[in-house]
Each structure stands twice: as structure tokens, then as C-alpha cells.
Amino acid sequence: MVKESVIPVRGFLIHISHYDPQWCKVKSREKPFDLDLGLEIIDTMSEVGLNLLVIDCADGVRYKSHPELARKYTVPMSYLEKLVNRAQEKGIEVVPKLNFSQSRYHQHNDWFRPHNDLFDNDNYWKIAFEIIDEIIQTCHPRRYFHIGMDEDHDRAHSQYIEAILKLQSGLKERGLRSIIWNDSSYGERALVHAEKSLAAENKIPKDIVQVLWDYSNVQPKIIRRLIEEGFQVWGAPGP
């Protein structure tokens, strides 16, 4: 068991469904989410001392407000409710996640089809918050909502910042803090995403939790920089 004083937030991310270039290569063969496996994961989380569960919903659950998002692998919203109930029984905080990144290249927003081409207009945000509200109604999150925003390839810096502010403001009205991925550990081909994260850091509220992700090592210098800027930071390094 990990002592809470050492690592206060010990989390795990479950994807009910997911979108990225590698995943999308086999999307046609995607099967519905295995609820029994999900419940087993939560039980194991409790056994090893994890205390926070992020559930990425995407188009993996069926929305009453927008049934047009359903795919062949979509499961009933009751699946999500059962995951939440099991986590709460185990004393694990639940954080729902929807990724509002705009990226035709990385396809993170393809779950929003057929509305993914609206590109941040009024109708886009109306639909987005209807879906957010339905997820909140099911998950009853205590503190947080994860809005994704990694590898946003299509928005300009100003549009990216404006989108984060729109989501943060709406979630704050609902009594929740926003969580975002921070891409600033990446360079070379992904430098455009790192630069976008860096630009946003100077413009967005400090109550947004920054999750610094990296497929390789922990990045202590970047973590310290974000903390010095006033952000709460969670690390998400690779193995």
C-alpha cells in the first residue's frame, strides 16, 4: 500500500472507448466495454491503494440527450453507473472524462461524430455541455471533470486557450474543477502541442489541474515549473 502522505493522488484511467490513430486502425473490430473486467479493475485498485478513477466515456456509453453518438460497441449508461457505484463503495473518487481536443490528425474528437466538424461554434458548445451534464448526472463527481485537450492539432493557440476557458467556466458553474492533459514534455514532431500547452499556461486559471503525461520518464523540471506557476500537477509518466 502506498502511504497517502507520499502520493496523495493515486489514479487509474479506464477507457470505455477511445480515439487515437492506433486505436482507430482497429475501430471496426472494437467490442463493447467489458463491465465485469471494469469492476474487477476497480476491486484491484482498492486492494493496491489507488484512490482516484478517471473514466473516459467518449462514445462508449449511450446518451439520452444525443443518441446519434451511439456506435455498434456503445453500452448502456447503466454500465457507467455500475462502475461509479463500485468505485464509491471502495472509497475511490470518480473523475469523468471527455476529450474536447480538436484534431483530425490524432482523431481525439471523432467520438463527437456527427458533430465534430462544428469547430467550437455555439451549437458545438450547446451539444458539448448537454453531454457533460448527462455524464455529471450519472457520475456525480465530487471535485473534478477531465476535459482532455491533448494533441490539439487544429486550433490556433488563441482558439485552444478560448476552448479551455469555455469548458473551465462551464464546469466551474457546475461546481467542478477542470483537469487537462499537459503536452509540454514533448518536442520534435509534437513540438506544436508542447508550444500550445505552454501558451495556455499563461492564460488559463490556476485552478485547472495539469496532468503532465509522458510515455517515458517522469519530468521533474516541468513539474516544478508548473507548480511554481501556481498549478496543481499530477504526473502520468510511462512505465
Image: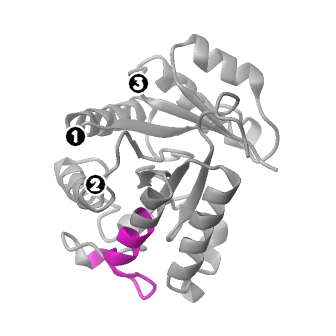
Quarter of the rendering containing residue 42 = bottom right
Q: Element at badge 1?
A: loop
Q: Are marks 2 and 1 in contact (CB under 8 Å)?
A: yes
Q: CA distance from mark 2 to mark 1?
A: 9 Å
Q: From the top left corner, tell me how far across and down residue 232 is, in percent.
A: 53, 25
In the visual, does 74 lie left or right of 27? left
Q: Looking at the image, is mark 3 or mark 2 earlier in the sequence? A: 2
> Where is 134 relative to 157, above or below?
below
Which numbered circle lies on residue 136? 2
Q: Element at badge 2?
A: helix
Q: CA distance from mark 3 to mark 1?
A: 14 Å
> Where is 137 relative to 187, above or below?
below
Work out whether residue 169 or residue 48 is closer to the camera in this orientation and state it: 48
Residue at 28%, 47% (x, y): give it: 120
Residue at image mark 1: 174
Residue 34 shows in this picture: no
Q: For the residue marked with disc 2, what is the amino acid?
A: Ile
Residue at image mark 3: 207
Residue 156 shows in this picture: yes
Q: For the residue marked with disc 1, what is the amino acid?
A: Arg
Report the magenta residues as a range: 68-84
Packing grade of label 2 (10 A; few <14, some 14-19, many >=20) is some
In the visual, does 45 lie left or right of 57? right
Specify whether residue 177 is painted magenta. no
Specify whether residue 73 is painted magenta. yes
Residue at 35%, 62% (x, y): give it: 116
Packing grade of label 3 (10 A; few <14, some 14-19, many >=20) is some
Q: Looking at the image, is mark 2 or mark 1 earlier in the sequence? A: 2
Residue at 65%, 64% (x, y): give it: 44
Work out whether residue 113 or residue 18 is closer to the camera in this orientation and state it: 18
Q: How many marks?
A: 3
Q: From the top left corner, tell me how far across and down residue 23 is, in percent.
A: 62, 71
